[in-house]
Image: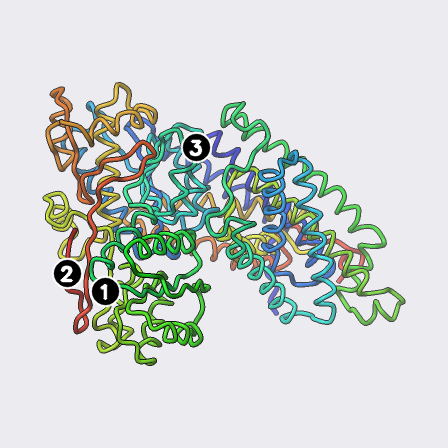
Amino acid sequence: MMQTNLGRRAALLGAAGAASAFAIGGRAFAQTQPLVFGALPPLTGAGGPYGPAMLRAAQGVVEAANSAGGVKGRQIRLAFEDDQTNPDAGVRGARKLIDVDRVQALMGTWASSVTTAVAPLCWENRVPLFTVSGADSITLLPHQGHIFRTQPNSRLQITTGSNWLIAKGAKRVFHIAAQSPFAQSSQEVMTERFSAAGGSVVGFIIYESNKTAFRSEVDQIMRARPDTVVLNGYRPDVTILLRELFRAGYDGRRFTFAYAAPPAIFESLPNEVTNGLTTFQPSPDLNSTAFNRLKASFGSTDVDPYSAQVHDHASLAILAAAKAAEATGTGIRDAVRSICQGDGTKVDNVTDGLKLIAAGQAVNFEGASGPCEFDERGDIRGTKFRYDVAEGGRYRMLELA
Amino acid sequence: MEAYLVAMLVFAGLYALMALGLNVIWGLAGMVNLGLVGFVGLGAYASALLTTKLFWPMPLGWAAGAVVAAAAGAGMALIVARLRGDYLAIVTLGFAEVIRLVASNEIWLTNGTDGISGIPGPWRGDVSPQGFNLIYLGIVWAAVAVAFILLARLSHSPFGRVLRAIREDEDVAAVAGKPVLWFKVRAFTIGAAVLGAAGALYAHYNAYIAPEGFAPLLTIYIVLALTAGGVGAMRGAIIGALFVMLLLEGTRFLSGAIPGVSPVQKAALREGAIALSLILLLRFRPQGLIPETTRTKASP
């Protein structure tokens, strides 16, 4: 074998050289003149299908704000890092954004574990954090007002879903859930809702989300004779569950979260399996001008709820910075509620909003994801939900409520 | 910038501690341990639970993290007594997954996939964030220094020589009258204790742990750190950890400097660059940056 070994000194020298190259690179790109915001979306890992569009939505808003003259004459720069859908990588990315780029607000964290890991850094460094994570526990952290969440928490989601099912006449419900922060709390909510309405949850199973066969679970479902099965899982396992339920001849209602059965599921399952599957999701305000403008800027592709929310994160941060006496993290944190709720003039984009704020007027921002009003814990209020049914390999919207 | 560099040095220190622990098990005794993140997780959970639920003082929590991981390490060594090479690797990988699954399902104890937040840190909240960073930098690198001195002595002691003999050829060591299993158990215990301590320190620095944080990704980073630094040499473990952290973080700035690529391509390029650097290093410097020097290896 050919031996081309580097000597120890050469190797260490090379490593040191690389180190100093990185350091110089870092200095050259750490300009702090403009107002800097940070995005921490998942560009790789489990959130990879969503992160790129989320980032694009935020970039679009920043570009619009910059061409409208920026915040009090200061241009805005959007720094971003990939959180790799991993808490460890997310914390390192957030450190870089906070300490090197000196961002005044962070936005677009997706996985609940990443958001929870990054949150202490944010409140310690007085940087507000705008997130799309749904775990109930996030806004219960001692965040001193630094967390703003545009995603309805999981308790609200399952309550809304249960109420809808009750209204549609569901009496005997079977709940099958992947192990997650909200599996148990979903069950409590459902039991409470259904027994109050005279129905019952006839069965409840928690499974490990990377399971590949669900024979015994499906047997249990069939034995309980439910009129509705709530599939509270993720796409890979829900795909298998749907197939096995079909094989077992289950003909009741199947109800699941839209993220667990995105349109791509039609490529992996035949139509006879998916027909009749009902999905629900917190919905962007599909008829709002903000949403339609975002959709147009994305081309003809569908806009997922997360991108719509991150569009609003960037808009809220920019308008709050313009409203605040000082465009700092604390200033933005304190100003957010004054630009998105109240009696101000309704605006749905940063261009108009910046203009009105500069003229000293009160504004009320209503974004692509909805009215963007936050309660005292930082949770979103009044989000709409949409319900779709699968028919012949595509979704048809049943209801937006 | 300073705060960021300090934070990354803390992470590098934690990685170095993990690499040192792995080096005893893999580098000296030659047992491939791909379950190291399991021991790290055990240490992290032990310390986090004892300090948040039973309000133990932090140093006791860290010690408990090390003890719990060490006990698991001893048990593990007995279970895998007859396994070598690939089979050992698979079993240890499985062990780490078991720990992760237990952590996400035993909700009464571990709070499930929500994780444990609000883990205390020394003087956290009383001093500025940067002050806390500096305090922790001192603690972590002091721990690295202590572990390094002790393990380096261990590695040059007769005990270390026996471990190397077992690594090179178990049967020869046995024929020479060495109780191989007993040595393996002790090596596994010591290594796991260091891994557990690293996990405990990690938990108190981040203030939050969740099962997802102990996915195999961390194992891969540490194995790469040790491979890059030089398997077997204690100094190599530390240099390797610094090198891996430099790659992970440095590529951020390099990929940011490339014009005309989309954010997703940058993220992918970054991961590609990390992989490529390590492949190149292993191709041209397979013994690592600081190879192990022993009398047998000095003159090939």
Q: Nearer the viewer, residue A106 or A5?
A: A106
Q: In the rendered image, which quarter contains the N terminus of chain B?
A: top left
The subunit letter for the residue under badge 2 reads: A
Whether callout 2 and callout 3 share a subunit is answered yes
Identify the element where label 2 is drawn.
strand
Identify the element where label 1 is drawn.
strand
Q: CA distance from mark 2 to mark 3?
A: 39 Å
Question: Residue at horizontal 40%, vertical 65%?
Answer: A203
Q: Earlier in the sequence, mark 2 or mark 1?
A: 1
Q: Earlier in the sequence, mark 2 or mark 3?
A: 3
Mark nearer the viewer, 3 or 1: 1
Residue B205: tell me if it is visible: yes
Q: Are marks 3 and 1 in contact (CB under 8 Å)?
A: no
Image location (x, y in percent) of residue A20: 49, 38
Residue B105, compared with residue B15, is above or below; it is below
Provide the residue designation for mark 1.
A278
Q: CA distance from mark 3 to mark 1?
A: 37 Å
